[in-house]
Image (cartoon, helix red, strand yellow):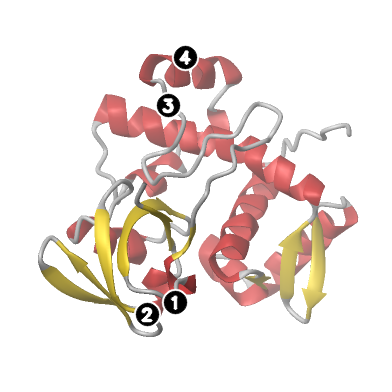
């Protein structure tokens, strides 16, 4: 399959947020896309229709969208830039974990493959600070054996694998409570609100935060 490299900054931004929302809640809703990108709903609708025409997005219901296989590849090609930018800013500049996603948005579109290659090589980076895999130049990612913490129906110890939806509110809460990739937490109660134990403290997670967390079993 021939990979079409997306050059438009707008296209890259839309593909990124649609993929993140699909991972977060199984679909991307028009209102959520518009809110995340701080644009009017009509502007979001127009750009989504443009991406549908390009074969990268498909509509699954009224106001709900997912990426096609080609759209996923294109989103990953851009996410390679974004996630490597996060590594660069956290490792070289010392940007805090809960701010690096936002700060990376200022440089991500200018990340060349030469810069990306050097950052990955210098820091042996396979994942971004939030635990998400850095895609290959062709837009493919390693398969990670994890699940959304909200999908669990049993209590017990798990490891935080990654954070799949990165808003300031979500990241600030997780950072303040040190619920970070690699941390061990204990599921005390499943369902909503989900309750966990972290470092001897009981925390009830708001559903909007819990849905962003993926975990893996302890091996």
First of labels 4, 1 by sequence position: 4
Pick whichever of labels 1 and 2 is earlier in the sequence: 1
Confirm or deny contact between disc 1 and disc 2 (CB under 8 A).
yes
- The quadrant in which the N terminus is found is top right
Mark nearer the viewer, 3 or 2: 2
Residues packed near mark 2 inside 10 Å, few (<14), some (14 to 19) or many (20 plus): some
Q: Position of residue 128 (x, y in %)?
A: 42, 38
Q: Where does the image place residue 176, in percent across and percent down from the top left? A: 18, 59
Q: CA distance from mark 4 to mark 1?
A: 42 Å
Is residue 63 in view?
Answer: yes
Question: What's the CA distance linking mark 4 and mark 2?
Answer: 42 Å
In-image side of 76 versus 200 (left or right) = right
Q: CA distance from mark 1 to mark 3?
A: 33 Å
Residue occupied by mark 4: 118
Which dot, 4 or 1, sits closer to the camera?
A: 1
Q: Which mark is residue 169?
A: none
Q: Dot 2 corresponds to which residue?
A: 190
Q: Secondary structure at mark 2?
A: loop
Q: Name the secondary structure under disc 1.
A: loop
The residue at the point 35 percent across, 54 percent down is 160
Please, is residue 33 above or below residue 6 in the view? below
Q: Mark 1 or mark 3: which is in front?
A: 1
As drawn, the label of residue 153 is 1
Given contact means CB atoms under 8 Å apart, are the residues at marks 4 and 1 in contact? no
Instruction: Decide: few, some or many residues near mark 4? Use Cα within 10 Å; few <14, some 14-19, many ≥20.
Output: few
Task: Give the residue at x 82% y 35%.
Answer: 4
> Disc 1 versus disc 2: distance between alpha carbons?
6 Å
Circle 3 packing at 10 Å, graded few (<14), some (14-19), many (20+), is: some
Disc 3, SS: loop
- Nearer the observer, disc 4 or disc 3? 3
Counting from the top left corner in percent of width and height, residue 35 is at 54, 70
């Amino acid at each position: 399959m021939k990979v079409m490299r997306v050059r438009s900054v707008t296209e890259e931004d839309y593909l990124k947020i649609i993929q993140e929302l699909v991972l977060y809640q199984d679909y991307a809703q028009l209102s959520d896309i518009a809110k995340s990108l701080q644009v009017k709903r009509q502007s979001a609708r127009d750009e989504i229709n443009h991406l549908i025409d390009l074969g990268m997005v498909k509509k699954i219901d009224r106001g709900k969208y997912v990426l096609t296989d080609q759209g996923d590849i294109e989103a990953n090609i851009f996410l390679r830039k974004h996630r490597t930018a996060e590594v660069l800013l956290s490792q070289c500049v010392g940007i805090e974990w809960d701010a690096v996603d936002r700060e990376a948005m200022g440089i991500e579109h200018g990340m060349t493959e030469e810069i990306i290659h050097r950052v990955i090589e210098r820091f042996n980076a396979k994942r971004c600070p939030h635990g998400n895999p850095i895609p290959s130049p062709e837009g493919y990612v390693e398969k990670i054996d994890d699940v959304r913490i909200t999908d669990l129906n049993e209590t017990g110890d798990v490891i935080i694998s990654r954070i799949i939806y990165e808003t300031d509110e979500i990241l600030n809460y997780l950072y303040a409570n040190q619920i970070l990739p690699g941390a061990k937490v204990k599921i005390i109660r499943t369902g909503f609100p989900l309750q966990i134990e972290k470092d001897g403290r009981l925390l009830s997670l708001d559903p909007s935060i819990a849905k962003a967390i993926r975990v893996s079993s302890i091996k």
